[in-house]
Image: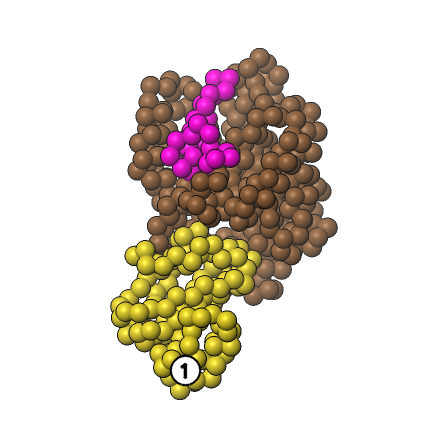
Amino acid sequence: MPNKKQDLIDQKLQDLNNDGVDRRGFLKCMAWAGTGLVWTLSGGIPVSRAFAKNYGKDAGKGGDFSFVQISDSHIGFNKPANPDVTATLETAINKINAMPHKPDFIIHTGDLSQLSKPSEFDTLDQASKGASAKQIYFVPGEHDMLTDNGEQYLQRYGKGTKGTGWYSFDHKGAHFVGLVNVANLKAGGMGSLGHGQLEWLEDDLKGRPASTPIVLFAHIPLWTIYPDWGWGTDDSEQALSYVKRFGSVTVLNGHIHQIMQKVEGKVSFHTAMSTAFPQPAPGTAPSAGPMKVPADQLQRVLGITDVNYVVSGRSLAIVDSPLGA
Amino acid sequence: MTGKNVWVASFAAAVVIAIVLQLAGSPSVAANDQSSAANAEVKIDNFSFGPQTVTVPVGATVTWTNRDDIPHTVVSTDGLFNSKVRDTDEKFSYTFAKAGTYPYYCSVHPKMTGKVVVQ
Ligand SMILES: [Cu+2]
């Protein structure tokens, strides 16, 4: 069905070129109303904001910080959808380096590699060295655990982590949890956290004040976006039940190579663009495989996600930017 | 993607020749082995196994070919076989020695499931 695919791309590009509507404000309302999946574009730039209530007003106050999420670099991928994924990852890193406010660290939400090859991880490491933010936190995607049950990934990126690579850390008053939902997947299912990890998570969050901003990040979305394509995590409900009592929860995922978000109570869900290639919107193509767009438009559908934490409002502002216009 | 068996005995011979040619060099396939008359092929296209169910006689070899731009695996739910990762155009074959029903899936994309029925 190449025509359907092309229609989608055309529509997407048309949206990208449509700068007549202030979708930024529009989205804010949509997000707070909890209206589910929202594609947002503003002035030719995909922009999404959630929990942006106080952002800007008190920006720059002590304790505020930002970090950047990148995802799905797929180093080693060389098919028509993007024959040079190393170059686009480098573009993403240059974009991060050029930001006016320096992010404290970078989170990579998985699929670093295409085939879990040592040479692919080497290339990713080499490109990462170019980032001015020296700390990068990783979680694996399914492409990073294709061999040896993820041993290679764990050796390189999982030092000090538990199980298949999960962990948590604190940063300036916020609590971050990296989860793994790509290991030991069951036939017919979607992403899976597994009993051991869920127990650890419950324990990890226990005793923390409800005012602590929580950021959960994992590769596959922790909310069900499209079960037919496996875009969800079978036991995510259980995980989310542990964060219900917190006042601000942000869930960052990758895997679907496009921006999607929803707000449910105090929980804001967000998926990032890929640095490698776009994937079709749910159900608009025969499968979730790489989507080919004209070469000169590729950088519009790849990108990074900048997350700003404003301490006074205990809120997070999420801004997605494409690699190029 | 119904679980329909597309293997029809009347055109088996022609297909067998194609499969044997494709597998030339693979020592596990003997051209004059009677059971090879019903070897089967499964294509991986658009994140699905086609046909989703194949029915073969005991001793037949099933060959999977990944035709997607994304790597997949072919893993027996009972742990009988595991293709390891198969990138674009890579193949995996398994010979079924015993009658039974063998469900399998892609361990990378577990929504992808299929079945081999050995009679
Ligand atoms: Cu697969």
Instruction: Identify the residue at image location x=46%, y=29%.
Output: A159
Q: Quadrant of residue A241?
A: top left
Quadrant position of residue B106: bottom left
- Towards the viewer: A179 or A1: A179
Q: Nearer the viewer, residue A39 or B89?
A: B89
Position in image of residue A1 (x %, y %): 56, 65
Can residue A253 be seen here? no
Which is more toward the observer, A98 or B74?
Answer: B74
- Image coordinates of residue A238 in percent, x first then y, are 32, 36
**Seen from this angle, which residue lies furthest top?**
A62
Left or right? Give the position of B57 relative to B92. left
Q: Residue at x 39, y 24 (%)?
A: A246
Q: Is residue A179 magenta?
A: yes
Q: Secondary structure at mark 1?
A: loop
Left or right: residue A320 compared with residue A266: right
Q: State whether residue A96 is above or below residue B65.
A: above
Chain under numbered label 1: B
Residue A172, percent from left and from top? 51, 17
Q: Which residues are magenta?
A: A154-180
Indicate whether residue A223 is drawn in magenta. no
- Which chain is yellow in the rendering? B
Query: Eyeballing the image, is B29 above or below A272?
Result: below
Mark 1, Cα crowd under 10 Å, few <14 / some 14-19 / many 20+, is: few
